[in-house]
Amino acid sequence: MYLHEIATIYNIGYEMVGRILNKRSIKHKTRKELKNKRDNELDFRKYSVNDDYFKTLNEESAYILGFIFADGSINIKDQSIKITLNKKDKKLLEVIKKIMKFTGKIHEYKNKSNKKSNKYYDNVELRITSKEILKDLLEFNITNNKSLKIKFPKNIPDEYIIDFIRGYFDGDGSVDVRLDERSNTYQIRTRICSGSKIFIDDLEKTLRKYGLKPKKIHSRNNIHELTYSTKESYLIYNLIYDRKNCIYLERKKFKYENGFISRNKNNNKGE
């Protein structure tokens, strides 16, 4: 492994990794030596995975593809794919790991919220090395540093588009439930965002095909966002959770349901 890869696992600087190894007289390859080793060994990796997982899409792989679009990244040089989540959502990564038959570990580390803040988040990350999976993901318009450049994939079969959208929503969507004091009614808002204006435009047009009203996209600081009202949130909920035994992020689905319950109770009191 490169020093920076080891450093990421332990959430320390790569210089410290080098000092620790040198202090204990542990030899490590230079970057050039390691690159040559990886280039020359076609089967360079510790862990196995279903390399053909994205060859043919189904309900589960379309969902995971959507999730990678939102919370994943690829590294063409290292031929790797990463999916990073908050630790509270580790259960979903465990499901993805099992479905893809990946034998590696889910790594845990702390990540600073921003450079100025002293607040840290507990994150979990799945890192998979696979030339075949990387090649297949590239066919779906995923690129390095994708956040500002991704495009909505055109080659997803129609029957799996909603699975893809549910995966993307679980990564870069949110549900907001608030009590409107003026109407004394709980309001539910569904938000979906992206750093790519092209992607969010196509997503909005796709959702229209399933009965959602046309929406204006709000943009600020390179973040482009769709916002849907309470009535539309009911439609989105019924749309993305329609399949039986589908994969989903539990806390978002439960937040919808708790919001609907609170709204109904509140309305019944008013009656």
Image: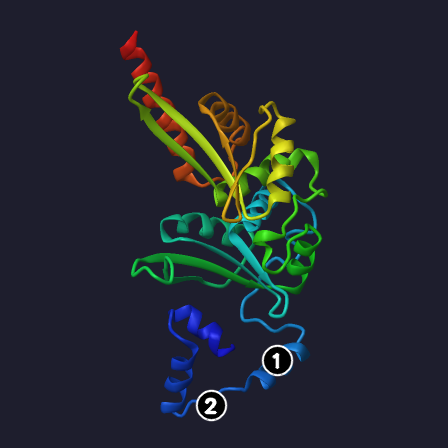
Crowd tier of the residue under label 1, counting other residues whose Cα lies within 10 Å: few below 14, some 14–19, many 20 or above = some
Residue 113 image offset from top left, x and y in percent: 37, 57
Question: From mark 2 to mark 1, how far is it between C-alphas?
Answer: 16 Å
> Which residue is at the front of the view, 222 or 174?
222
Question: Which residue is found at the position 36% from the left and 49% from the top?
Answer: 88
Secondary element under disc 2, as helix, strand or loop, is: loop
| Tag 2: amino acid | Lys
> Which residue is at the front of the view, 94 or 37?
37
Quadrant housing the C terminus: top left
Q: Is residue 201 above or below residue 235?
A: below
Q: Which mark is residue 260?
A: none
Residue beneath disc 2: 27
Residue 66 image offset from top left, x and y in percent: 58, 45
Which coloring applies here? Answer: rainbow
Q: Nearer the viewer, mark 2 or mark 1?
A: 1
* Left or right of residue 20: residue 132: right
Q: Is residue 241 above or below residue 45?
A: above
Q: Is residue 192 above or below residue 116?
A: above
Residue lying farthest to the bottom in this orientation: 25
Residue 30 image offset from top left, x and y in percent: 54, 86
Secondary element under disc 1, as helix, strand or loop, is: helix
Residue beneath disc 1: 35
> Which residue is at the front of the view, 180 or 174?
180
Question: Which residue is found at the position 69% from the left and 34% from the top?
Answer: 158
Residue 39 image offset from top left, x and y in percent: 66, 77
* Left or right of residue 106: residue 209: right
| Tag 1: amino acid | Lys
First in sequence, mark 2 or 1: give its number: 2
